[in-house]
Image (cartoon, rainbow, N blue to C red):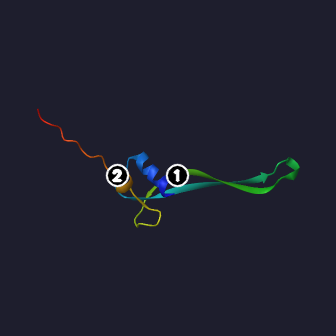
Amino acid sequence: MKDLTALLIKHYGLHEGNFDLLIEFQIGMGAFGPTPDMQAPGAMIGVSKMGLARSAQIGPLSVDAAVVNPPPKSRMTKKK
């Protein structure tokens, strides 16, 4: 989970702050089975969305954006 959080921090170009992974699940219910006469009630759970949530307190799965995606160093131009 921390690796996925770090990947999203790099994807969004964040350079400061602590973030936690935000996952939204979707649940579907219905009749499932290999054949129509062998169906039984069931449920399927899937991930519908993933994102980042800024964390107010540092937890065990929080990731510091300054550590995993430090800001680029500015280059000084030389005068001729």
Give the residue type that dot 1 points to.
Answer: Met
Depth order, front residue of 40/9: 9
Residue sitting at the far right: 37
Give the residue type that dot 2 points to.
Answer: His
Q: SS of the residue at dot 2?
A: loop
Displayed quadrant of residue 54? bottom left
Contact, mark 1 vs mark 2 (Cβ under 8 Å) = no
Ranked by sequence position, the earlier of labels 1 and 2 is 2
Residue 15: assigned label: 2
Q: Measure the alpha-carbon separation of dots 1 and 2.
A: 19 Å
Q: Which residue is mark 1?
A: 50
Q: Residues within 10 Å of mark 2 (few under 14, many from 20)?
A: some
**What residue is drawn where x is 79% and y is 57%?**
41
**What residue is drawn where x is 85% and y is 47%?**
35
Apparent side of residue 79 relative to residue 70 in the rendered image (left or right): left
Q: Position of residue 3 (x, y in %)?
A: 48, 54
Q: Position of residue 24 (x, y in %)?
A: 56, 55
Q: Position of residue 58 (x, y in %)?
A: 41, 66
Residue sitting at the far top: 80
**What residue is drawn where x is 26% and y is 46%?**
73
Which quadrant of the figure contains the C terminus? top left
Q: Residues within 10 Å of mark 1 (few under 14, many from 20)?
A: some
Depth order, front residue of 14/68: 68
